[in-house]
Amino acid sequence: MNVRQNKLASLAALGLVGGLALTACGGGSDTASGTGSDNGGAAASGDYASLTGNLTGAGASSQQNAQTAWTESFMGIAQGQGSSLNVTYDSVGSGTGREQFLSNQAAFAGTDAALTEEELASSKEVCNGEQAFDLPVYISPIAVVFKLDGVDSLNLSPETIAGIFSGKITKWNDEAITKENPDATLPDLDIVPVHRSDKSGTTENFTEYLSETAGDVWTDGPVEEWPTSGGQSGEGTSGLISTVQGGNGTIGYADASQAGELGTAAIKVGEEYVPYSADAAAKAVDASPREEGREDHDIVVKLDRTTTESGAYPLVLVSYLAVCGSYADQATGDAVKAYASYIVSADGQKAAADNAGAAPLSDQLSTEAQAAIDAIAVG
């Protein structure tokens, strides 16, 4: 498992990190009791004592720190009530996570890109005849990170960022960069752009931002797989960060929770340069509408990348939990509903904020997400 060990001392003392086990979404169950209900069992009551088995999720590496906190905290509560449930999350990337979910290898997926129409249609095959849906669970800025000796921060416009990653701007002392950073000492050094090597929701959010804000400087559209050759790459968030850290003159993009000691860029929004922060990311999400044409309970935010609201940081991702609308297996369904309910609760969102720097869901988003969870059919 690629699960980052989080230093939650009280939870670690309880030995709460569960082992790997795969639990399918749709199969029958020898442990199911009764017929279940739309608000079934432990998930609705908050009584976790009856939860059993192994609940496995997979997906976005951006959620890794938050998922570590969520799984440990949730199991601490559940096992304290006498539950034997183990919850694990494998941060294999959004694309692979969705593939595992839709092939019945995982009970839920973490994804930085909402399920497509084709994925929603195919989900009925593993979701007991019902369609899957997306729950917003994690809001985080995407940081433009770099390693450049002697420089800790930069101001960059969308056009300049697009020029760097499209290969049009190749030197750190290029006029486009020096004009935006008159007080920085920038060397005559090659820029080494670093992108994700795997199918990535972070890449899709990053390229969507460039497509909508950089004009004709970025022409490759919003894509999950990096569209151009050149530069270097890393697998997953950790691989990209490691590649950036290992060089000088390197620049990449990653969930801000894993920026560490790397330099970061403030991006131009309107007439100001805005550094990333949880509050700035939340402002951008609050200014964005819902995506139209989605079924009930499929909650997808249509991010307004072009907002000029003061203090907003529109280079942001809303990461989702993809879950089934129905689980034939009672134990799996109850566990998914209980775990998802914890994640969208005030306590779950605080755990993500404390351990991953995420912006908590608004009260409205949290309420909508809980209503969707309550509607999941079980048994």
Image (cartoon, helix red, strand yellow):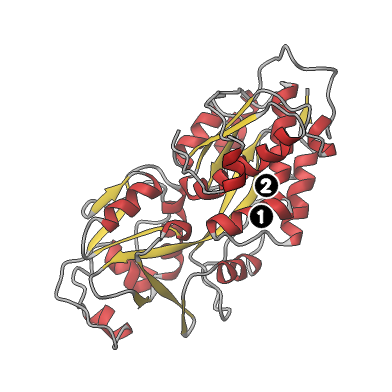
> Residue 225: x, y in percent?
37, 46
Give the residue drawn at x 31%, y 65%: 146
Q: 166 above or below 237?
A: below
Q: Earlier in the sequence, mark 1 or mark 2?
A: 2
Say what secondary structure mark 2 lies in.
helix
Q: Residue furthest bottom?
A: 182
- Considering the image in quadrants, where does the N terminus appear? top left
- Considering the image in quadrants, where does the C terminus appear? top right
Q: Which residue is mark 1?
A: 349
Residue 309: quadrant of the picture: bottom right
Give the residue drawn at x 65%, y 44%: 73
Q: Nearer the viewer, residue 11 or 205?
A: 11
Instruction: Please indicate, yes or no, whether residue 298 appears anywhere in the rendered image.
Output: no
Badge 1: few (under 14), some or many (20 or more) residues near its Cα, within 10 Å? many
- Given the image, on which type of amino acid does mark 1 rest? Gln
> Residue 363: x, y in percent?
75, 61
Q: Which residue is mark 2?
A: 343
